[in-house]
Image (cartoon, rainbow, N blue to C red):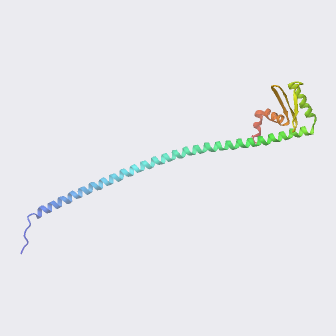
Amino acid sequence: MTAPVDALSPVRAELLRAARTSADAVMERARADAEETLRSARVTAEAVLARARDLGRADGAAEAARERVRAVQDAWAAELAARAEVYAVLRASVRAGVRRAFAEDSSLQSRCTEAARKLLGPQARVTDVPEGGVTAEVPGRRVDLSADALADHALDRLGVLAETLWEPA
């Protein structure tokens, strides 16, 4: 016996073939869309990465510039601190030298007393300073001829010549 002939078999076969063709076309479009999406994502990622590198370089350059400024400021502050220390040592040394001169030469005390009276007049009240020298006063005026004041005045008179202390020998 022979199997009955199915009249719909060719229709089914054509529908199946059309469905497969349509599915293949959809799959091909999906692959093409996926490839385009990936390509576009790669291009975007490369652009974002390049921009991030540029921004990173710019940020790094700006930070490096700030760090250079800080380093220069720190170096200047250290130099000023060293200068102040050297000047303080010099001032202490000059003061000690002037005090020693007063201790070794008693005529300096009387010469300071005379100078004070010349500056303020004979009515000036003159007071000896223990480290050497004198201070003198009249109402509204005061003169300090102490050893420390004389040493400080001598150093102050150096003015810009004091800058030579910082220059290399």
Quarter location, residue 69: top right
| Quadrant including the N terminus | bottom left
Near-viewer residue (102 or 6): 102
| Quadrant including the C terminus | top right
Up the image or down, 88 lies above or below 15; here it is above
Q: Is residue 35 left or right of residue 149?
A: left
Near-viewer residue (132 or 1): 132
Q: Is residue 68 left or right of residue 59?
A: right
Q: How many marks?
A: 0
Quarter location, residue 5: bottom left
Looking at the image, which residue is at 88% across and 24% down?
Answer: 121
Near-viewer residue (40 or 161): 161
Q: Is residue 115 left or right of residue 45?
A: right
Up the image or down, 86 lies above or below 26; here it is above
Looking at the image, which residue is at 92% across and 39% down?
Answer: 104
- Tell which residue pokes out farthest to the bottom in this image: 1
Report x, y in % for residue 30. 28, 55
Report x, y in % for residue 19. 19, 59
- Tell which residue pokes out farthest to the left in this image: 1
Quarter location, residue 98: top right
Q: Is residue 152 left or right of residue 30?
A: right
Report x, y in % for residue 113. 90, 30
Looking at the image, which residue is at 64% across and 42% down?
Answer: 73
